[in-house]
Amino acid sequence: MILRLVRLLLVLLVVTFLSYLLLNLLPGDPTTQILGLSASEEAREQLRRELSLDDPLFTRYLAWLGELVAGDLGTSYTTSVPVTEALAERLPVTLELLVAAQLVALGLALPIGVAAARRAGRPLDQVLTALSFGLLSTPVFVLGVLLILVFAVKWQVLPATGWTPISLDLGWNLTSVLLPAVTLGCAQTAVYARLLRTDLIATLQEDYITLARARGLSPRRILWRHALRPSAISLVTAVGLNLGALIGGAVIIETLFGLPGVGRLIVDSIFARDYLTVQGGVVLISVGYVLVNFAVDLVYVAVDPRIRRA
Amino acid sequence: MRRRLGWGFWLALGWIALVLAGAAAADLLPLPRYDETLAGPPQSGPGPDHPFGTDGLGRDVLSRVVYGARVSLGVGVGAVVLGLLIGAPLGVLAGYRRRATDAVIMGFNDVALAFPALVFALAVVAFAGASLVNVLIVLGVLGVPAWVRLVRGATMVFSEREFVAAARVLGARDRTVLWREIVPNVSLPVASYAFIGMAVAIVAEGSLAFLGLSVQAPTPTWGGLINEGRPLMENAPHVVLVPSVVMFLTVLAFNLLGDRLRALTDVRQSGLEPVRRRRADRLPAQPHHVEEGVLLQVADLRTHFTTVRGTVRAVDGVSFTLERGRTLAIVGESGSGKSMLIRSILGLAPDAGTLRGGSVYLDGQDLTELDGEQLRRILGTRLAAVFQDPMTALNPVRTIGAQVMEPLTVHLGMKRGAARARAAELLASVGIPEPARALRRYPHQLSGGMRQRVTIAMALSCGPDVLFADEPTTALDVTVQDQVLRLIRRQREERHMAVVLVSHDLSVVAEWADEVIVMYAGKVVERGPAATLFERTRMPYTEALLRAVPKLTDPAHHPLRLLPGRPPDLAAPPSGCAFHPRCPYARERCTQEEPPLFQAEVPDHLYACWYPVGTGAGVVETSGISGTAEALKAAETTGADETTDAIEGADSRGR
Ligand code: SF4
């Protein structure tokens, strides 16, 4: 446990350091990049002092880290909005999208994986396996474009873009999150279904399953009570590990579907040369990702009696 | 090789070759230039001049897709090469050197893997500028951790193999070992992952381009084309569809190549997996007579599997009867079909590709005629089974209590409270201390002996009439073995049940069994009362088994006595008497005619042999087909045959 915590801190330090380092990647004079060519010499001098650009890198990082811990990521020079505030406003959208996508993915993967495993090697399994393989090979923006083409342009049953906050109207909120969540969740569905299938096939060959059959238990009971539980536990780790891919996808989905989330904010800020906001978004996402993975690890330990120590 | 890779592989390879050739020769193709506006009317659909139509500015879509392939494939290949160049040496170093080097490299690697890669790529490109070189470097570097992990894993596997260890012992320099032995062996997994890595890089570049953060206009890229086509979706869907489909096919093709190559390294297929065709079929059975007043009668039971290599006769015409209060032992080498016999009696043999025949009567009722529901009721209450390995016999993620209580609630309809109390009694009766506490524990918290007691308690929970114990003590310590066998015998006496004990240990059999069946290649080759069978052995195979039993007079650490020769290949059993290649008494007739079961002088003692031992019939001629000495030598060098073990495993593999 102590080891885990030390590792977590270490990873967090590296992640934040790399995020801080991003500013140094700016070619030429950063003040010109941030303020634009037309900025006055005084304004630049002020920014230079604010960012303490004359200090050595590591000192600057530590100072920045101190402010980060205090919840201050600076104020955007383009919009004059504190970065933390901008992010806080956008975060709920991204979180809802991620959660909805995971629900879609798990909700689809469970029946698909179970169906494929029960009929391993037979036609249904082969079709499902091929479908999963195809889905895994579909870039998320290609899938999104196709889904928009079908559901929003051709059939016009779902909106292609736009967002209704959950506080405004739950029904519309769900409508606006449905297509993005399905797009984002689909690729994960393939990952999860594959994993579940493989794991379940292995589990169903275990002695304890044969013995459960020898005890005259019904196939359904064996599947749901005996086999699915150990397999579901392996799925928990996959959910955590795939969060990285999911977050990357969320940036694209938010842009594609016009959702006002953190990913969209980052992309918009990139084009607005609002570097502080970009940096803030990257910090938020990577730290969040590391923390969620850490939490998943803990959950895994909690639900799997095999690694839980008495 | 061609057949194993499958047509999908060649199709995918063809597609990639086509796209590559198109990208390389784009300037030579009779296409309008990608940036030539108004090459045709804007947004026009596919036609003779423009096979894939034109975009919003009247540019040829096909041309733009072909030129776009340069960036996509270039970044895909380039990023993989870069990642490999950095990652492979680190991975080999970590896997080969181990210890500190390994720890440091893998520590860094773990941290690097803890990043949301695409977001980081996005940020770096955003700050450093969107250009081909930057995109390539970022994607290449982000691929490094995965490469390190893969190469390290492959290197570790191979550096443990004998030939590498041998080369090290012989004093070969590390670098020589690396180049000669390890590099060629890790190249297949590396090639497989290279294709998958290309697919990943192409998608990542596409994502960046889609967001407008890859190579800038006017150079076309696939992701960029898809982004451009979006506003035209309503009127000219082809503008977005064509690059989408091309991109999908390309990514699919790369993934397929990687997947097929990886399947090549998979050596699990042995040709003995059941062919999955239809559900179980019935084999015609010999006419037999159902004996009255007998608890269990097995009549001409057959279980055959259709495999790629032919029909495997795992159980081939086994018959016996068993009365209450008695123990029947089934002995034979592993692969002789004894475990499959138990599973066939209980209806647990795999379904797919299986041919069944014969009957199992319990108090005169034929179990093979029952439907699933009826059979389950009997399995739960009247028949019970214990398997060899207590480590795998209990569900690791359910508590002991949940597992012991389950048959009680399902079959006996007990309420939870009552079931819990009964479960505790059961655990106490098999000698588990503090049963109430044990109910709350998980299997891994108990020792092997305790776990086997739990499985016995579960088997006994509904008061069965017959207990099938498949090598119940083989996986246990010698001291625990005796306790478990005593426990089974005590329960047999208390409950007046019958026991079928599968074992390869004849000393156990001699002590605990009333009757014995010796199996070879799925058939009964000798059968009789235990004392008679051991004293007046007729079948040479039984004699060989008896000889192989370790004797008290053996010096300590005496090497395990092996049976001479190899167990038979069940997919292609020897002609005549299946034992003839290993039999010291075999003669001409044995290779041609299969011996039936003969009646010995003691009633109920049967044997299948033309020249039984102990009757003088076997020593007339000495020109055996294989002498014992040679066979023994062969056994020393070959060991057990893996293919027959695969059959034993088949019962757990299929469903
Ligand atoms: S003597 Fe002939 S029939 Fe008897 S076991 Fe040997 S080979 Fe088989």
Image (tube, coloured by chain):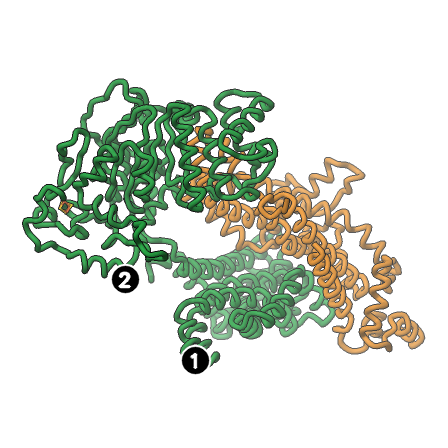
Chain colours: A orange, B green
- Label 2 and label 1: CA atoms lie apart by 28 Å
Q: Residue at x 45, y 28 (%)?
A: B460
Give the residue number, with chain letter if any, for mark 2: B637
Quarter where residue B576 is shown = top left
From the top left corner, tell me how far across and down residue B602 is, in percent.
16, 31
Q: Which mark is residue A257?
A: none
Q: Which mark is residue B172?
A: 1
Quadrant of the image containing the C terminus of chain A: top right
Q: In the visual, does B366 lie left or right of B416?
A: left
From the top left corner, tell me how far across and down residue B204 is, in percent.
61, 62
Crowding near pointer 1: few (<14 within 10 Å), some, many (20+)?
few
**What amino acid does circle 1 point to?**
Ala
Above/below status of B113 relative to A233? below
Name which of mark 2 and mark 1 comes first in the sequence.
Answer: 1
Q: In the visual, does B639 lie left or right of A199?
A: left
Crowding near pointer 2: few (<14 within 10 Å), some, many (20+)?
few
Provide the chain ID for the residue under circle 1.
B
